[in-house]
Amino acid sequence: MTAWVASEPLLLINFILCGALMRRGKEFYSQNYKKALDLHERGIAIKDIAKTLGLSYSAVYSWVSKSRRPGKGALIKFKEVLRSRGPMPAALIKKEIKKHNDFYHIARQRGLGIKRRVIKGLKLGEYAYWYYLPGQEQLLEERISELLNDYKQAKEKLLSVLKKMKL
């Protein structure tokens, strides 16, 4: 572990809070873009902004000089889809977020709040995996209940047809 100098408390705080041992995704840069611009507008030097936010000098310089802006990462898109549409099964979310399983695990590691519920015991395929955000639990339960009711009705109808066919 690196020895920390008392004159670098902000760097130490960023090291602890940001998880310096973990790869930073695009969402990290997107979250700090506005902070960097605000600090620059207050007259803080680029070097100090970079140090305070735990960013590279070149990233901050390119932001404040208006030459580039960080892009939205797939994790942010994943979260925005869930925020706007509510809980969704993997079968539907994969149309927009192809690597939803990988992104779920990365989001969990980074503490982004994306949760997953697995319905066990039934052969539901990609409808067994549901993604949601905190605060969407009630809507999740309603949607899963609706799915299970539809599943039960479809099963009963299929068994009725098979019974008529005497199979």
Image: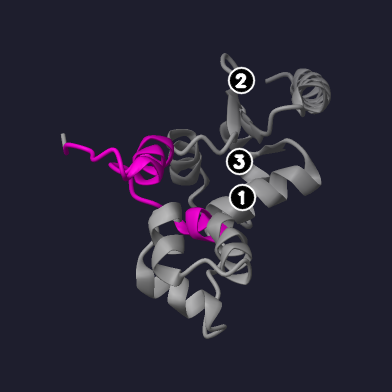
* Mark 2 residue element: loop
Please identify the quarter of the rendering in which residue 58 is found.
bottom left
Q: Report if residue 9 lies within the magenta region.
A: yes
Is 71 part of what is drawn in magenta?
A: no
In this orientation, which residue lies closer to the viewer: 140 or 83?
83
Amino acid bearing label 2 = Ile
For label 2, the residue is: 119
Q: Residue at x 78, y 19 (%)?
A: 152
User: In the picture provided, is 151 more to the left or to the right than 49?
Assistant: right
Q: Residue at x 42, y 62 (%)?
A: 48
Q: Earlier in the sequence, mark 3 or mark 2?
A: 3
**Model colouring:** one colour
- Give the mark, 1 or 3, whose residue is nearer the N terminus: 1
Q: Answer left or right for 100 relative to 139.
A: left
Residue 65: x and y in percent read 53, 83
Mark sitting on residue 90: 3
Q: CA distance from mark 1 to mark 3?
A: 12 Å
**Of the residues under marks 2 and 1, which one precedes in the sequence?**
1
Q: For the residues carrying marks 1 and 3, which lies nearer the camera in this image?
A: 1
Secondary-structure class at tag 1: helix
- SS at mark 3 in the image: helix
- State the residue position of label 1: 78
Alpha carbons under labels 2 and 1: distance apart: 21 Å
Q: Which residues are magenta?
A: 2-30
Residue 149 appears at what percent x and percent y? 82, 20
Crowd class of label 3 (few under 14; some 14 to 19; many from 20; radius 10 Å): many
The crowding category of the residue bearing disc 2, from other C-alpha atoms within 10 Å (few below 14, some 14 to 19, many at least 20), is some
- Where in the figure is residue 133, as x and y percent of width and height? 68, 33
Relative to 13, does residue 28 appear above or below in the rendering? below
In the foreground, 141 or 41: 41
Q: Nearer the viewer, residue 13 or 154?
A: 13
Using the image as rendered, state which of residue 133 and residue 161 is in the foreground: 133
